[in-house]
Amino acid sequence: MVSIEQFLAAYDAQLRVAGELHGADRVEQRGPLWWAVFDDGWGFVTYADLDGLAGSGLDSLIVDTVAHYRDGTDVARFEWKTRGHDLPPDLGARLEAHGLAPGEQETVMIGEAAELATAVELPPGVVVRRAGRGGDLVDDVRRASAMQEEVFGQGSGRSLAALVA
């Protein structure tokens, strides 16, 4: 049986930083943070962990990050991605104290693939296929992006060309 701590460690190792920064036009590391700018003027902040940073040291890094995106880039917005198991526990409050506003809480479901692999009966008329196979890749990506925007109220923030690439 895999423990919650093992799942979280696997999530941190496999889904943070490199996977999130793929496709960024510019990436810069500042302490434990990675600052990214994507092609459409969207900024993104991520990290594997904050290396024990807390208190005034963390506040300074938040101030530097806000200044970086405000003064050193032409981004219209940026996201500082946090997770519920991130430390220190007051990270969210510190970000808010420096003017950042929390987005809607997201949920990631993790499980053993063998337990999750089951046959799924699709409704009539629904076909699941890889984008570009059996259709035009650009059209498939455009429609998937429109669906994401409709479902979540915003798109990915990336241009169609970047998503297709």
Image (tube, rainbow, N blue to C red):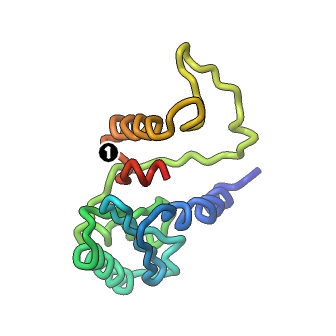
Residue displayed at 40% across by 41% down? 145
Residue 2: give x, y in percent of width and height: 73, 53
Q: Residues within 10 Å of mark 1 (few under 14, many from 20)?
A: few
Left or right relative to 111: residue 90: left
Instruction: Give 15 or 162, whichever is nearer the viewer.
Output: 162
- Front position in the image: 32 or 145: 145
Furthest residue to the top? 124
Above or below, 124 against 18 in this view is above
Residue at (38, 63) in percent of width and height: 38
Judge whether 12 appears above or below 163 on screen. Answer: below
Residue 126 x/y as whole percent: 54, 20
Q: Is residue 110 left or right of residue 103?
A: right
Q: Which residue is mark 1?
A: 154
Q: In this picture, is 68 found above or below 19?
A: below
Disc 1 is placed on an element classified as: loop
Does 140 sit left or right of 129 as displayed?
left
Residue 156 in the image: state x and y as whole percent: 38, 50
Q: Amino acid at mark 1?
A: Gln
- Percent position of residue 67, x then y: 26, 79
> Total label count?
1
- Residue in the image at 43% along x and 49% along y: 106
* 6 with respect to 106 (left or right): right
What residue sits 32% from the left and 45% below the top? 154
* Residue closest to the far front: 136
